[in-house]
Image (spheres, rainbow, N blue to C red):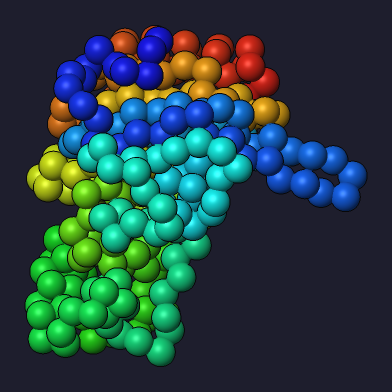
Amino acid sequence: MDPGSSLHNGKPILEVKEMCKTFFAKERTVIALDHVNLSVYKGEFISLVGPSGCGKTTLLRIIDGLEIADAGQRSLEGVPLSGISQDMAYVFQDINLLPWRSVLDNAALGLEARGMGKSERKDRAMEVLEMVGLASFASSPPYTLSGGMQQRVGVARALAVRPKVLLMDEPFGQLDNFTREALQVEIAQLWEKLGMTIVFVTHDVDEAIFLSDRVALFQPAPGRITEIVDVDLPRPRADYDVRAHPRALELRSHIMTHLRAGKGMPE
């Protein structure tokens, strides 16, 4: 399927063109990205799916400016990007909260880095903590929270800067299944409420189907997007058992078959 999905018309908010990245080690060379192209449309939720080492996290980091590509171009709203974009925010798999700062101050960290005044950033941080259900923990140190709650602080920190595009790198990968599924529902609800644009990395096919409008399938060595699949399931998906839906079963079978054929079998 063409990267310009049938679900979308008009110009994309985020574009990646001919992106290449190679890593050199002593004994081998790894082509992490081989002429990767991707268009992301305003307000959509798109997941990048593939096994560990297929290049999906490398692409996400290059999109944000955390890594430099060997070749290729990225643009936001038609404007070429260089360096880290202030219009995007990144949620890491490792939560990376500062233990000596309160939950509120952790949520305000990105605003502080952007030079926002103390009173305004406190109000903004409290606003996003309310969105993720943690306002009552604002004064708590993060180490007193559960893993799921800490990850919600990380999401709040990203939302606080009001990004045009939210990048999420396997944010639930280290959580137990119950907490993971609960946070999937919360992210889906936030996305629907705020109309966010999200690029989400995962190797969990069921997670991608539950959350996404489209799923970009990666193959490893060299890292390429080999197909983009439209997830044409009704929303809100928390209202029914997505995994049991006949169309979801078809999508899962198609994705798994495609990944196996490309030796991109998720773990």
Q: Quadrant of residue 143?
A: bottom left
Q: Is residue 69 left or right of residue 149?
A: right
Q: Residue at x 31, y 11 (%)?
A: 247
Q: Residue at x 16, y 87 (%)?
A: 118
Relative to residue 138, is residue 61 depicted above or below?
A: above
Question: Could you tell me how many numbered marks the image carries?
Answer: 0
Q: Quadrant of residue 85?
A: bottom left
Relative to residue 24, is residue 261 depicted above or below?
A: above
Q: Position of residue 214 (x, y in %)?
A: 33, 24
Which of the pair 177/156 is nearer the observer?
156
Q: Position of residue 79 (x, y in %)?
A: 28, 43
- Whether residue 177 can be seen here: no
Q: Is residue 205 left or right of residue 239?
A: right
Q: Position of residue 208 (x, y in %)?
A: 39, 32
Relative to residue 202, is residue 88 depicted above or below?
A: below
Q: Residue at x 69, y 35 (%)?
A: 31
- For the N terminus, the quadrant is top left
Which of the pair 68/229 is nearer the observer?
68
- Whether residue 246 can be seen here: yes
Q: Residue at x 25, y 30 (%)?
A: 12
Q: Position of residue 5 (x, y in %)?
A: 29, 17
Relative to residue 3, is residue 68 depicted above or below?
A: below
- For the C terminus, the quadrant is top right
Which of the pair 183/4 is nearer the observer?
4
